Image: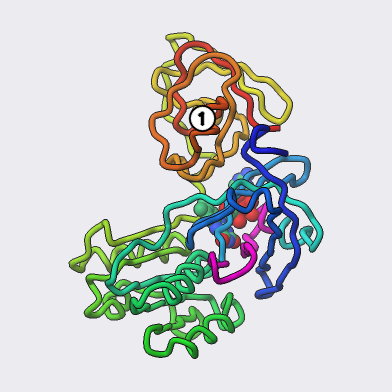
Amino acid sequence: MTSLDGPYHNLSVVEVIEETSDSKSFVFAVPDELVERFSYRSGQFLTFRVEVDGHRIVRCYSLASAPNIDSRLKVTVKRVVDGRASNWMNDEVSSGVTLEVMPPAGHFCLRDRETPIVLFGGGSGITPIISIIKTALETTSRSIFLLYANRNDQSIIFKDELSALLSRYPDRLEIVHRLDDVHGFVDSGLVIQHVGPRADADFYICGPGPFMDVVENGLSTLDVTSEQIFIERFESPDASAEAGPVDTSAGTLITIKLDGSETNVEIGEGETILAAARRAGLEAPFACEEAYCGCCMAKVVEGDVDMLMNDGGIDQRQIDEGWVLTCQGIVKGNVRIEYPD
Ligand SMILES: Cc1cc2nc3c(=O)[nH]c(=O)nc-3n(C[C@H](O)[C@H](O)[C@H](O)COP(=O)(O)OP(=O)(O)OC[C@H]3O[C@@H](n4cnc5c(N)ncnc54)[C@H](O)[C@@H]3O)c2cc1C
């Protein structure tokens, strides 16, 4: 598949690393012609389209590798109970398998500052965080503090890699491991205690929802501005969430082609294409719904669509080819949309 056919490219898995009993890392070879498109910043993620039980699903996985430090791209996938993609990746993907992948995206990245970096990682939330740590250690002189929460000692992903970094940078890196079975859950008091005098830091938070809430609550009591806080949410918005009533009386009808089937969907005034598709019961792909992941991209083959915003989820070349982010797509009259085959 070339970039003109759609946003996905084929990448081969060249190595699978068993990280813990419920997580594996997947290392990819990037062919020469795609090296530029797959260049990335620490903290970004890749979007995968996989087929599980006959259904195509799209999922994002953060890069745990760091550009110019690790020679290959690596993502780490932790099993989610009853989760479709995460278990399929862990069970079925071995070296030699080819996967459909979108180029890197995301804003959970380092910015140019000299202040300390304080990171809060929980479980698989360590993946973008370790990438940021490696790059910050290598390319800046900033001091780095990581609070890393896990259920127990066996579930610590990248334990050895983190301790190797500690040995290499003992004066700049500090890591506190918190284990639920030994120390209990992290609370706001602990967050405040560890931030200590570093209220001027940049803060990076990635982990389970309740963990991130606790960290945010702790930071909210300190003299920390929202510009200092970077958050990566792994949980997609609830696809089954009830959409509010939508007035479709204006009568605009759009045609959506997804997984080979066409469906006519009534779309309300100001409603996005994605929202209308989901309201109609279609399993249209999406993740961030904030115009930066690119998961929900589809091609406009007839009619006109405006995007409310584009936060890097789609590039100009794709826009010129007719692609839109459906989470931001507002139709201007009847249109026909096709999701990538
Ligand atoms: C930017 C970003 C980066 C990410 N990076 C990583 C990463 O580095 N590593 C990582 O492991 N994960 C990461 N994730 C999370 C990942 O994308 C997936 O969300 C995760 O792997 C779960 O997907 P799944 O298909 O296995 O689970 P799903 O099948 O989507 O299920 C998720 C949960 O919903 C429940 N569920 C599923 N179907 C239904 C249903 N019909 N009704 C009710 N409940 C249901 C399941 O029981 C499960 O608990 C990231 C997410 C984002 C948005």
Residue 155 picture location, percent across and down:
59, 77
Disc 1 is placed on an element classified as helix
Give the answer, above or below, for where 189 lies relative to 129.
below
Instruction: Write the residue at 45% across / 75% down.
Output: 138
Residue 272 picture location, percent across and down:
46, 27
- Residue 50 belongs to the span the image colors magenta: no
Residue 122 vs residue 303, the one in the foreground: 303
Q: Quadrant of the N terminus?
A: top right
Residue 340 picture location, percent across and down:
66, 32
- Residue 82 belongs to the span the image colors magenta: yes
Residue 269 vs residue 24, the one in the foreground: 24
Amino acid on which the number 1 mark rests in the picture: Ile
User: Circle 1 sits on which residue?
Assistant: 319
Q: Quadrant of the C terminus?
A: top right
Residue 17 picture location, percent across and down:
71, 72
Residue 235 in view: no
- Label 1 packing within 10 angstroms: few (<14), some (14-19), many (20+): few
Give the answer, above or below, for where 271 lies relative to 166.
above
The residue stretch that appears in magenta: 65-87
Q: Is residue 334 left or right of residue 185?
A: right
